[in-house]
Image (spheres, rainbow, N blue to C red):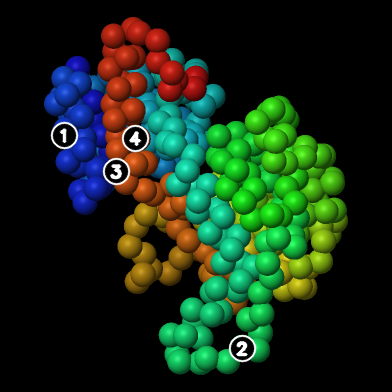
Amino acid sequence: MKVTVYSCREFDEKELFIQYGKELGIELVLCPDAPCMENIGLADGSDCIDILTTRMTEGLLGALKERGVRYVVTRTIGYDHIDMEAAKKLGITVANAPYGPHGVADYAVMLILMSIRKMKRIIERTNIQDYTLKGIQGRELKDMTVGVIGTGRIGRTVIRNLSGFGCKLLAYDLFENEEVKKDAEYVTLEEIWKQADIITLHAPLTDSSFHMIGKDTIARMKDGVVIVNTARGGLIDSQALMEGIESGKVGAAGLDVVENEFELYYYDRKSDVLSNRELAVLRGFPNVTVTHHMAFYTDECVKTVVRDSLTGCKLFAEGRENPWEVA
């Protein structure tokens, strides 16, 4: 069988793809660029393509289907960049490649600690040899209440990680988990808005969760609330967040994801004028830490997504049960 891999990174993925492709008996076409109308010819003869976070529109999916592609796997947990309705209509199977929860969970806790200890300002001062203390007094987690929204694998791991800090833990999910109840109390979203000093997001992006944090919900939060997002940018209304920061209602934010980041991350854009104005403003706040959707990025994660994305292709081609198919 043959698989065309798009957005294949030379420095960390290529050797792994070659290794696992050989082990699985898969012929590979490795392309460093994202799939587009200009390079879909590389998928000729491939039942499967392997992608990252490129927007897969109905037009692009249709063109791939005409070339024989029946299966699209994304080397990510989320698949909101794929037009699922179009894939279904075209008869294309979609799969993901979930990685372990620890990398993102560790990163979320890091952003929480950086936010409450004002680490961005501390680093900036140290870089210019400003060793003053005014304005960088922090808070301690043991004195704070953390609200965890989403208690899937990552959210549960965040809760376990935070349980050692002595903070009060609140949790929200549509489906409660007994493991979580050992360390956290399930409450309504309204209770999280009212009680939490820190809110960390670990929910999928759906029609119902889009902009779950917006102007109205921020108004109901505690003054000086800290908001951390390592899930999906669309969970937060960027304009409302900026207004909350400017008014002082939001005391700090740690953002590994932002709205409209597609086609922005993971490219070298340092000489470009970016159209994402909200990102530019958010980056400029002294109490906002912004990173480029990389909480997942660990040695273990890269191995896992390469291996499992190819394994799923093989299972699909052989008509066997595939645990990574999402539609």
Other residues around mark 2 within 10 Å, as few (<14) / some (14–19) / many (≥20): few
Q: Amino acid at mark 4?
A: Thr
Visible residue check, residue 88: yes
Q: Amino acid at mark 1?
A: Ile
Nearer the camera: disc 4 or disc 2: 2
Query: Disc 3 vs disc 2: Cβ atoms closer than 8 Å?
Result: no
Mark 1 or mark 3: which comes first in sequence? 3
**CA distance for labels 3 and 2:** 45 Å
Mark 3 or mark 4: which comes first in sequence? 3
Visible residue check, residue 59: no
Seen in the image, is 195 located left or right of residue 312? right
Mark 3 or mark 2: which comes first in sequence? 3
**CA distance for labels 1 and 3:** 15 Å
Percent x, y of residue 56: 43, 35
Q: Residue at x 35, y 8 (%)?
A: 320
Residue 7: image tag: 3
**CA distance for labels 3 and 4:** 16 Å
**CA distance for labels 2 and 1:** 52 Å
Query: Disc 3 vs disc 4: Cβ atoms closer than 8 Å?
Result: no
Seen in the image, is 84 located left or right of residue 299? right
